[in-house]
Image (spheres, coloured by chain):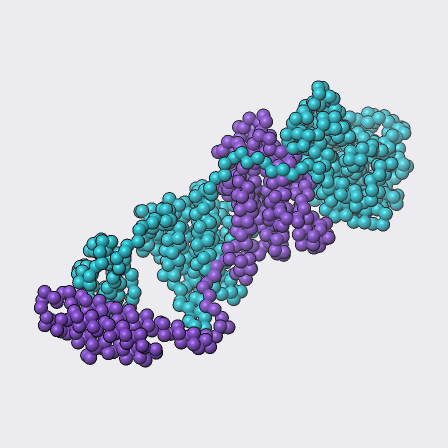
Amino acid sequence: MKVNYLWLKDLLPGCSLGGPESVSRTLTSIGHAVDTLTIRGEDAVFDLDITSNRPDCLSVIGIARELAAVHGASINMPPSDVIEEGPRIEGVTTVIVDSDDLCPRFCARVMTGVVVGESPDWLRARLETIGQRSINNVVDVTNYVLFETGHPVHAYDLDRLNGHMLRVRPARPGERLRTLDGVDRVLDPQVLVIADQKDAVGLAGIMGGEATEVSAGTKRILLESAAFEPRGIRRASKKLGLRTEASTRLEKGCDQEAALFAAARVCRLLQEMGCQVSRGYLDVRAASEPHGCIDLTAEEVATLVGVAIPIDECGKILEKLGFLVRFDAPSKLCACAPSYRNDVVSSVDLVEEIARIYGYDRIPSLLPPLDSEPEPLVPHLQLEEDLRDGLVGMGLTEVINYTFITPTGDPSQMRPLLNPISERTHLRNTLLPGLTESALHNFNNGNEGIRLFEIGHIFHLPDQECAALGILIPAGLPGESSWRSRGSTSDYYDLKGHIEDLFDRIGIRQVKFSPAPDGCTTMVVALLTAGGDEIGRCERIDIDSKHPAYAAELNLEALLTKVESRVSYRPLVRFPASSRDVSFLIDENIEYARLAAVVSEASGPEFTGLSLIDLYRGDKIPAGKKSMTMRLRYQSSEKTLTSVEVDSLHERCVRALEQAGAIRR
Amino acid sequence: MDLLAELKALEASFRAEIAACSDDHALTELRDRYLSRKRGLLSDKMRLLPQIDPAQRAVAGQRANELKRLIEEKLQERASEITASQRAAKPDLIDVTLPGIRPPRGFLHPITKTRREICRIFMQMGYSIEDGPELDTDYFNFEAANIPPDHPARDAQDSFYISEDTLLRTHTTPVQIHSMLRRKPPIRIIAPGRVFRRDATDATHTPMFFQVEGLVVGRGISFAHLRGTLQTFAHMMFGSDVKLRLRPSYFPFVEPGAEVDISCFLCKGRGCRVCKDSGWIEILGSGMVHPALFDRVGYDPTGLTGFAFGMGIDRITLLKYGIEDTRLFFENDLRFISQFGG
Ligand SMILES: [Zn+2]
């Protein structure tokens, strides 16, 4: 909201405000942040960021009140006395409020002898400084009073109102109204309207109607200055998609006591411009409870703020802010908020009032006593951090993608957003589309070394949310190469190797990679299980038509249950190990895992390890066969094995392989 | 003659000869002389094995194999010694200026780096880390945080709904509520995580971003403690010369509330583009926990106080490195991510 310096000065005569910069600092320090300060000659405009709990500060008087409290000054309220003449208002118009729960107060005044025309220079200039365009004297005066008091006042052309009366009622179903902005609106009973005898003539608290607008021919006006139930205004304004200077104030709650004053101010200013004010006013108001008193002890202030502020100083601050303060007992006060402070309802609110005027700057900096026991990082977060460190250590880069995605697969498996703002319409049920998108972006920008991972939540139907890890490694591309060697082409085995290494690092053993069962989508290459539970899968995906990739997605909750102690220390064996190689041909369709199982079943306790050191497929061997060379290691924890002993152990394993179909070479 | 004795003599002569070898060529000759299948000295001895007394054969055979292994080992050892001494004698064989062979390098996302930095600081101050679901109920996201329906504060937190009652959390405050329900005071936690607001995407807004919120609840916790905690954080995060400014502000879940600025670490308070010439940068929102929250989680509010604070991880990363566009965080361009170190 914009407020100008000279206007504030008018309301605070004899108060040494300092210059605009000083006012700006003061306002910021008491909670009204100045977004920008624009100096304009002698004047200056503050663009204020008023928090939503302080609708009273959406006005020059409101800001002046705050400054007066800081400086211990009092505010010079602008004149609102008028000379009344002509017939009494009761003889000219009537106001009926049907829904007094939604409209607790409605004040009306009538002015005659109106000549609609240009506003005087001072008015035009002042409105201009706060960014308001001049329209005509009547509209300008109502605007001026809105910014001055924070209370909206609307002027109707009295002679265009059917029955010369106003009624506050819910809109009829399908009722139509063309508002001042020229838009035809269809209303429903959830919207409160101001109507004349026949039709709606305005949206209560939001905007008037075009048909009863003050125009060049207007002679008599009816002024409305009302308070509405804030939630009703808020809902209607949201529903209609219409926010105005009036509605932004009324939806936060207005000072009901200001309604009559605002109307009188409009009368006074228009009277100064030659209009006549009719005798009396109408004031329809629902019974309202006055603000209750709030108790506050010095101890409460000291506990919450952390500094002892004497109770009489607290009381003085509150009085300066317009509160009625009574000291009931030593170290205790009782405060009643002014009508414009609906936001202050409990003792903590009083404490904030005291603290902000006392000065947040004067509150000391202390560290809280450490009375809670520090805890280790919870296992699932520790796992995520270990995975990140492991993957980065292997040369992968972390990405972060949006949680909502454009469905690529079957959208019926995904949870849709009710109100998306882009083509990202669903919650992701897998991390892989995001990783693919990131990889594509990097390919398109010519980046190298694209090996990516993401850790984040995914969402499954009906209402599951779980943490997952996604890894993507492009296939068929050479890896890092240097002047010494060319990198090898990456494929599924690189992805698998990364996962195996990662599992070693975090303490997961006994993971099985098995071929995707029938019924899986063709993209799935392998399923990962541990102890019989599925923990993830590997897929072959296309980043685009030219770039295939291998990707894996692991369920972190399942993974967490499989983490064993990362360190399992075993004493070193003092006797040397020996190894023997065996080369053989075998049917292509026999899996490595089966051969490894055959070897480990056949061998005794001296067998300590197996590695595949060569695998050949091609035309140098019979069709349907592959050639493998395995290296088996043997070691005893009790003695040095002789070569004869090793040979015989090895022979046992080789025979088992032969029984499984291996043809020794 | 005794084969074992001969093997012993052979070993002695080999040890003498290998010591004298000074280049690769001599080593090859030596290997041939001892191990060549046809004329090797050791091979000759091994051929004698079948002829000797079977009682001795096993022992001699084992001994011969061991000698063979020893010879091979020594040859290899000597070969690397020779290579090393040649290198030492002729250092120009290494062009020390050739690029080193680097292992592949990966990078953490800058948001993760900042999150860890923030969390580390608070963990040093004894905080525990909490997390929670990204999809939560309207109750935990808003009502329990003292933001009833139609509350003006909902305007600033326009949300993505999944159902009438379920939404993507707009702040990590629901994690605080869940934690309070699960724990008992005293509490000292921080909650980092993704949050979502229905904002149009531009250079300063993305519909998803990251927050860290902190919560301390106990007896005698005051605004002064909040101030001291945030000052310690700011010094550790931005440098010990950074000044702190607390301004009254409004968040429904705290009272009194405060917006927290730090003196601009780029221009040292003189005014620049980042601080919009004010010399101050807003980094977080905070305040004393509103008693209504204690009420919602069933705590007896008598004598119980607490403070809470929240900051945007993206925003702090943006400020810290002078990044001009927040959308870069989710574009995942390696040229961007790789600038923030491993
Ligand atoms: Zn600066």
Instruction: Work out whether residue A397 or residue B99 is closer to the camera in this orientation and state it.
Output: B99
Q: Is residue A355 above or below residue B245?
A: above
The image position of residue B138, as x and y in percent, is 54, 37
The image position of residue A500, as x and y in percent, is 36, 55
Name the residue: 44% across, 55% down: A391
Give chain B's shade. purple
Give chain A's shade. cyan
Q: Is residue A544 left or right of residue B33?
A: right
Q: Is residue A132 above or below residue A441?
A: above
Name the residue: 31% across, 74% down: B19
Q: Residue furthest top?
A: A329
Name the residue: 38% across, 63% down: A491
Q: Is residue A646 left or right of residue A4?
A: left
The image position of residue B98, as x and y in percent, is 49, 73
Which image quarter: residue A631?
A: bottom left
Instruction: Work out whether residue B209 or residue A654 is closer to the camera in this orientation and state it.
Output: A654
The image position of residue A215, as x and y in percent, is 82, 41
State whether residue A317 appears in this view.
Answer: yes
Instruction: Work out whether residue A494 or residue A475 is closer to the camera in this orientation and state it.
Output: A494
Which image quarter: residue A130?
A: top right
Q: Is residue A70 above or below residue B67?
A: above
